[in-house]
């Protein structure tokens, strides 16, 4: 399992996964994303992106981690943690001292060192974005901040990621019968019977 930058060929998959997970795709650009990939099968397991918020004149730019998602069959395997780590590392390499997240699931991110930021203390661009997120996700969305050099990866996520495999697909317990399709098996004729 590894995390890499998204490529143009990932765009359709990303849009489908974003829709499937009910995430927002505001200002979507596939090149802003990173994707967790199973090196054995090539299956994509999770993703996330950095979104730049340009400051007004005299204000510094801010960077937001957003659109973080893990496919259901890959959850609990450290995929999301490694996506977040890659995003934080990328932000640090780009010269940002801190990253922000606007989320309705703060408990997940606080285990990496993120701290809640009072709404009044958010930079203006992120404050506006918070209103958008609350409208999209409903109430309960809060702002979190992390200095990039304070990211902490719990060991359990590293170990889970090393041996990550997707959950087995649930067996389809329903068996379809001819009656399900409106066919009476007692009187039905079969393939290529034209009834002549």
Image (spheres, grey):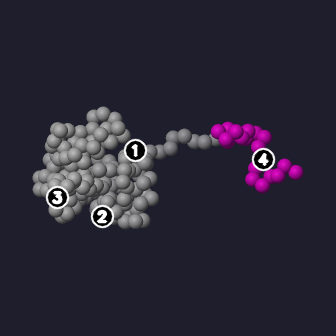
Query: Is there any visible trace of residue 182 in the rendered image?
Result: yes
Asked if the residue at tag 1 contacts the one at tag 3, i.e. Cβ–Cβ closer than 8 Å, the answer is no
Task: Give above or below for 50 relative to 107.
Answer: below
Q: Which residue is mark 3?
A: 96
Specify the quadrant of the image occupied by residue 31: bottom left
* Predominant secondary structure, magenta span: loop
Q: Residue furthest left?
A: 150
Mark seen at residue 4: 2
Q: Residue furthest front?
A: 57
Q: Is residue 155 left or right of residue 180?
A: left
Q: Which residue is mark 1?
A: 22
Q: Residues within 10 Å of mark 2 (few under 14, many from 20)?
A: few
Check disc 2 and report its element: helix, strand or loop. strand
**Which comes sooner in the sequence, label 4 or label 1?**
1
Mark seen at residue 189: 4
Please report the bounds of the magenta region as a residue range.
178-196
**Which comes sooner in the sequence, label 4 or label 2?**
2
* Residue 151, position as x, y percentages in the image: 15, 53
CA distance for labels 3 and 1? 28 Å
Q: Residues within 10 Å of mark 4 (few under 14, many from 20)?
A: few
CA distance for labels 2 and 3? 20 Å
Q: Residues within 10 Å of mark 1 (few under 14, many from 20)?
A: few
Mark seen at residue 30: none
**Which comes sooner in the sequence, label 4 or label 3?**
3
Residue 129 in the magenta stretch? The answer is: no
Q: Nearer the viewer, mark 4 or mark 2?
A: 2
CA distance for labels 4 and 3? 70 Å
Q: Nearer the viewer, mark 2 or mark 1?
A: 1
Task: Give above or below for 131 relative to 66.
Answer: above
């Amino acid at each position: 399992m590894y995390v890499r930058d998204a490529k143009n060929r990932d765009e359709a998959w990303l849009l489908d996964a974003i829709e499937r997970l009910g995430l927002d795709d505001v200002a979507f650009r596939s090149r802003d994303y990173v994707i967790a990939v199973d090196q054995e099968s090539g299956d994509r397991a999770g993703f996330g992106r950095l979104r730049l918020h340009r400051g007004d004149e005299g204000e510094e730019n801010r960077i937001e981690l957003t659109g973080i998602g893990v496919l259901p069959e890959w959850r609990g395997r450290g995929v999301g943690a490694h996506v977040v780590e890659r995003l934080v590392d990328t932000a640090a390499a780009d010269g940002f001292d801190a990253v922000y997240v606007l989320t309705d699931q703060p408990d997940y991110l606080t285990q990496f060192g993120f701290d809640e930021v009072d709404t009044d203390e958010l930079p203006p661009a992120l404050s506006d974005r918070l209103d958008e997120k609350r409208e999209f996700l409903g109430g309960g969305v809060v702002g979190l901040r992390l200095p990039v050099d304070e990211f902490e990866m719990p060991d359990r996520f590293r170990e889970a990621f090393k041996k990550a495999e997707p959950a087995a697909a649930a067996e389809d317990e329903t068996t379809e019968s001819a009656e399900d399709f409106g066919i009476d098996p007692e009187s039905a004729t079969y393939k290529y019977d034209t009834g002549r």
